[in-house]
Image (cartoon, coloured by chain):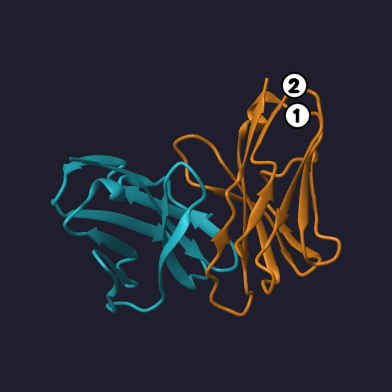
Amino acid sequence: DTGVSQDPRHKITKRGQNVTFRCDPISEHNRLYWYRQTLGQGPEFLTYFQNEAQLEKSRLLSDRFSAERPKGSFSTLEIQRTEQGDSAMYLCASSLGQGLETQYFGPGTRLLVL
Amino acid sequence: EDKVVQSPLSLVVHEGDTVTLNCSYEVTNFRSLLWYKQEKKAPTFLFMLTSSGIEKKSGRLSSILDKKELFSILNITATQTGDSAIYLCAVAHYKLSFGAGTTVTVRA
């Protein structure tokens, strides 16, 4: 399978715990994006990387959120001190990054904070 | 801030009907508009539109963009139950700004 993969697919955690999600993009794609989707809404942009450089972070991304893409391949998204409002689907997407952007999405990680 | 509005929010049709979904937008630095289909999982790509008036087709689905009036439509003809999904519209510069989606339910 050469699509975008994410791990884990589901995560249940207690409020206050830290969680980390992983995304592996399509291998030749140098842009990687994180989005968050809550019920009844479209995905909302969180942050994106061009290779290993994080180029933009949404104001939705509070200080409790951090994302990395250390070698320009896979990326991790960590949420510290989780809150119930963090419960959502976290989607990763990748694109070639050569102008017009068709982004391909992974299956998502569904987070539930109890 | 970018604004993408989809209508209707939901609709129910019977197999064989034709549906038309609307997407209007107000964005800076518009580069393209994309349509995705989402069925209880990640969005899957349908179309990318960059030029006004050029219809894109894929089987029973088609879409067109009007950059002057800032909207796009997605048509689905001869609907099937497998078309039941949320259809998302997004505008792109580097990131995607999504609308809330239209939930389409096709009844047998």
Q: Relative to A5, is B35 on the left or the right?
A: left
Q: Position of residue B20 (x, y in %)?
A: 22, 55
Q: Relative to B19, is B96 on the left or the right?
A: right
Q: Give B85 or A67, whichever is nearer the viewer.
A: B85
* Residue located 82% across and 32% down the image: A18
Q: In the figure, A45 relative to A78: above or below?
A: below
Tag 1 residue: A82
Which chain identifier belongs to the cyan chain? B
Q: Give A39 or B95, whichever is nearer the viewer.
A: A39
Q: Relative to A50, is B82 on the left or the right?
A: left
Considering the image in quadrants, where does the N terminus of chain B appear? bottom right
Tag 2 residue: A14
Secondary structure beneath label 1: loop
Circle 2: residue type:
Lys
Q: Nearer the viewer, mark 1 or mark 2?
A: 2
**Label 1–label 2 contact, CB within 8 A:** yes
Chain-order first, disc 1 or disc 2: 2
Q: Position of residue A22 (x, y in %)?
A: 74, 49
Q: In the figure, B49 relative to A48: above or below?
A: below
Q: Relative to B38, is B62 on the left or the right?
A: left
Q: Chain A takes which shade in the image? A: orange
- Give the letter of the chain under mark 1: A
Q: In the figure, B89 relative to A73: above or below?
A: above
* Residue located 71% across and 44% down the image: A61
Please tell me how crowded label 2 is: few (under 14), some (14-19), or many (20+) other residues with Cα within 10 Å: some
